[in-house]
Image (tube, rainbow, N blue to C red):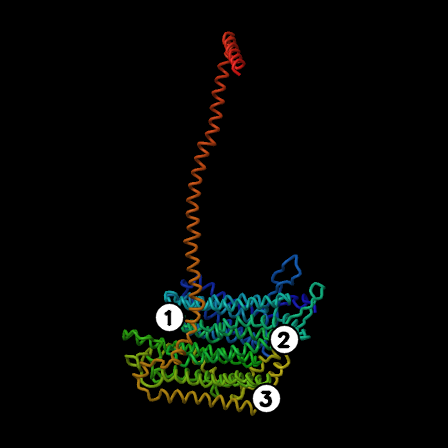
Amino acid sequence: MELSELLKPLAATPQTTTALVVLLLPLLGFLVLFILGRRLPRHGDWLGIGLTTGAFILSGWLFTQTWNTATFHMRTTWFSLPGNSLTDFTAGILLDNLTVLMLVIVTFISLLVQLFSVGYMHGDKGYSRYFAFLGLFTFSMLGIVLVDNLLLLFMFWELVGLSSYLLIGFWFHKPAAVAANKKAFLINRIGDIGLLLGLFAFYTYFRTFDLEALRLLIGNGIWEGGSFIATYTLDGQDWRVELGPIFLTVAGLGLFMGCVGKSAQFPLQVWLPDAMQGPTPVSALIHAATMVAAGVYLVARCYAFFTPEALVVIAIIGAITALVGALVALTQYDIKAVLAFSTISQLGYMVMGMGTGAHDAALFHLSTHAFFKAALFLNSGIIIHAIHRGLHQHHLPLDAQDIRNMGGLRKAMPLTFYTYLIAAAALVGLPLFSGFLSKDAILSGSWTWAQTMGGGLYFVIPIIGFTVVLLTAFYMARHMWFIFFGAFRAAFPVQDVRLAAGQEVERVMLLPVILLAILSLSIFFSLNPLSFGGSWLLQGISLERLSTSYILADELVQAVIARDAANHTLHLVFGILSTLLGVAGIGWAILKYRNRPAEQLLQEQPKGKLAQFSHQHFRLNEFYDRTFVQPTLALGHQLYRIDKRIIDYTLNNGSKALVILAKIVAWVDRWVVDGLVWLVGALSKVMGRVGRGLQNGKVQSYFAYSLFGFILLMLYIILF
């Protein structure tokens, strides 16, 4: 297989050109708004929304052109390095089912977030800057989705990190926001180091970053004698690559490290709860469909590169993350913190699905989660906005995000209540809602995977998945009870949270949450709302649709086939079991909080060491602070002291010594060197004058000098 033939340029098509336009529209919005935003009418929000609307419409057209129809690929030579045997570096756009699905999700969620922000961010001093950053964020995420090679993907990956840094720290006058964006940026860099090492490991042996070429090279490889062997031709020379399973596993886990950072997997998930320091619409954008989805998307794109051992590690990490996120969400009181830890838990579900071979189920859950989690975050923004309104009107210093200060909002804010309820039901995974389908697919896949892998400890993974269903139902029911039921616990009339007597919130903020709530119903994803097997989305993103080349061993491929071929009874059992667990969790929460008086709910604190441990996120932040941050700061402080007390002292005193030495040298130069030169000149001058005096032209003088010399000669002879 000639590698240069695999990387030959491919002509652009109307579809790939349109995709390039989709990519550049948000960038155009960013540049114009960042430079001229304050001079434009309404500070340019209409421009950002208009360009994103155009990108969404074009993405919809690309979806109709591509979905289950064709794959479009444009490739061009990016640059070459002369004088070596490396292949040309290429750049291109790849459109397949996964690409167009992500295009629609990203542009749609971004559009709704921008519409919502018109009401939420109205009057903010950085209004135009905010919309500019949203444009940069959207551009960066679309770049990850569209590019066809790992090097370009990494570049856009870092742009997403920069964009999130700017948006999380948008209110940079708040120290907490500055700390949060710095934390997110640094922790993501830890994962990115692994990603960078992983992609260069594959490049070292396969001489290309192109995803399609890598898939073909790996797909044509074979396992022989415990090693993976791939062959290709480069510049007419045959290359044979023989890689051990340990190397392939480590290289694949390097790529997965990028997912661990970006998609907030254990143990790097600590940045995501802090990211809520940004404006609430930003939380919806980051937590729902864009930044955190990038890691899962990366694993999907590189799925052919993971060995079975790597996928087992991925499944374990995903299960731990799902459990940790759910346990911590049980004891949170900040409305956005509950949703943030819920996001961590759901991302764990997706990664667990990837590791257990349920690749399509994980992407299915990514899609459904995008809608109902965006609805939850935007609704939480409406509630926070409303509570702020009442607190400001009555000059009360309460925390507008603390659910203990809420209660009884379902009557004052009925539309918000019903849209929140639908999205929460989808998150719990109740029948007729989208989360039921995608969670059931992941749970079925993980159970079948455990059976195929030989059972035993492998069943811990699906058991954790079912446990998280129960925990999710409990913390979301608790969440809903604190916010919408019982008596209103803030010290002002509940009706004061409304925008006006006949209007609960700005209409521009209601439209996005209503659309997202409607899209949280299962009917949009499967004609049979109780079975994921017939889902058009699940079938369109199956492994067979996205790639036919794997590095996987036979047992994992068999797990995928077995899950797809599992009988209807097994699906029915899992559906009933997950529903019962969801109902049990909801009932548990209602029984626990139904009869508690308002004063007790207002003063509630985590009781017991385990509850406090959960409330503090298992003290992971403190552990990292003691283990890594403080030693690093102490090392930096010691290096600073060494720099000031030794290096600077040496340099400062050394300079003084040099000044003294220079003065001594100058004195020696002036009085010894220059003095000797002057003395020689003076002696020469004196001798010259003496000699000139002797040569006066008088015979008498010459006779006298001769006589004097003769007398001296005679004295010398007599005495010596």
Dots 3, 1 in contact, CB < 8 A: no
Number of numbered tags placed on the structure image: 3
Mark 1 sits on what residue? Answer: 122
Q: CA distance from mark 3 to mark 1?
A: 52 Å
Q: Amino acid at mark 2?
A: Ile
Q: Nearer the viewer, residue 597 or 16?
A: 597
Give the SS element for disc 1.
loop
Tell me if mark 3 has few (under 14), some (14-19) or many (20+) residues whose alpha carbon lies within 10 angstroms of its own.
some
Height in image: 583 above or below 335?
below
Residue 45 seen in the figure:
no
Q: Amino acid at mark 1?
A: His
Residue 260 seen in the figure:
yes
Mark 2 sits on what residue? Answer: 551
Q: Quadrant of residue 418?
A: bottom left
- Name which of mark 1 and mark 2 comes first in the sequence: 1
> Residue 106: x percent and y percent?
50, 74
Q: Residue at x 45, y 87 (%)?
A: 582
> Residue 3: x percent and y percent?
67, 67
Mark 3 sits on what residue? Answer: 566
Q: Nearer the viewer, residue 300 or 72?
A: 300
Residue occupying the far front of the picture:
719
- Using residue 200 as the reference point, say whether residue 129 is left or right of it: left
Q: Quadrant of the N terminus?
A: bottom right
Q: CA distance from mark 3 to mark 2?
A: 24 Å
Height in image: 123 above or below 476?
above
Give the SS element for disc 2.
loop
Tell me if mark 1 has few (under 14), some (14-19) or many (20+) residues whose alpha carbon lies within 10 angstroms of its own.
few
Give the SS element for disc 3.
loop
